[in-house]
Amino acid sequence: MNETHTTVRGTVITDPTTRRVGEDSVFSFRVASNTRYQDRDTGEWKTGGTLYFSANCWGRLAQRASGKLVKGDGVIVQGRLLTNEYEKDGRIQRDLEMRVTALGPDLSRMDVTMRRAQPEGPGISPDGEGAGQSQGADGVEDVMEIGSRDADDAPEGRATDSAFAEAVRV
């Protein structure tokens, strides 16, 4: 098994699933990442090869991402890239998996508003002070509404909301 840490920008191509493995939650989905280049002779944009892999989020990341990501969402995933070998029908098979350590929306494809996650433990705010929401310099809560629009897919003047961006907490 070979292990490499990497960051990939891609698209969720399957409906994500959540399952339990022992005490942990695992949130899984498939990602496709295409290369695009401009042909020097014709000036035309072309699509190169496509990288496909399974992405698996564990623990707290799985809990936060579960139910927020949908097929078609643009994502940026970071983690350990692994190759797995197994035998199927007498043949050696290989697949590519990423153990995701960070997950976020691709802001070049989506408009997203996020809300900061509350730290673990009673009475602690994100700024390290007493209980409750943190406040910005102007005294306004440091919470932003959640919402996403993929301008490329929406009709003119109307955007679509993504479940991923509606509830992602960072």
Image (cartoon, helix red, strand yellow):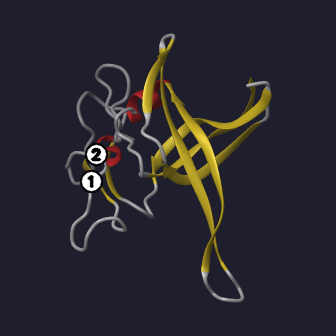
Tell me where residue 20 appears, x and y as whole percent: 46, 17
Dividing the picture into quarters, in which one does residue 43 lie? bottom right
Tell me where residue 81 appears, x and y as whole percent: 68, 39
Gap between marks 1 and 2, in whole Å?
A: 7 Å
**Quadrant in the picture for the N terminus:** top right
* Depth check, front residue: 42 or 139: 42
Whether residue 82 is visible to the viewer of this picture, yes or no, is no
Cβ atoms under marks 1 and 2 closer than 8 Å: yes
Q: Which residue is mark 1?
A: 161
| Eye-nearest disc, 1 or 2 | 1
* Depth check, front residue: 52 or 159: 52
Which residue is painted at 59% across and 55% down in the image? 33
Residue type, mark 1 in image: Asp
Tell me where residue 68 appears, x and y as whole percent: 35, 39
Q: Residue furthest front?
A: 89
**Crowdedness near tag 2: few (<14), some (14–19) or many (≥20) residues, C-alpha within 10 Å:** some
Q: Is residue 87 left or right of residue 134?
A: right
Which residue is painted at 46% across and 31% down in the image? 61
Q: Is residue 2 left or right of residue 108?
A: right
Tell me where residue 52 appears, x and y as whole percent: 62, 47
Which residue is painted at 43% across and 26% down in the image? 18
Looking at the picture, does residue 11 appear above or below residue 117? below
Residue type, mark 2 in image: Glu
Q: Is residue 77 left or right of residue 64?
A: right
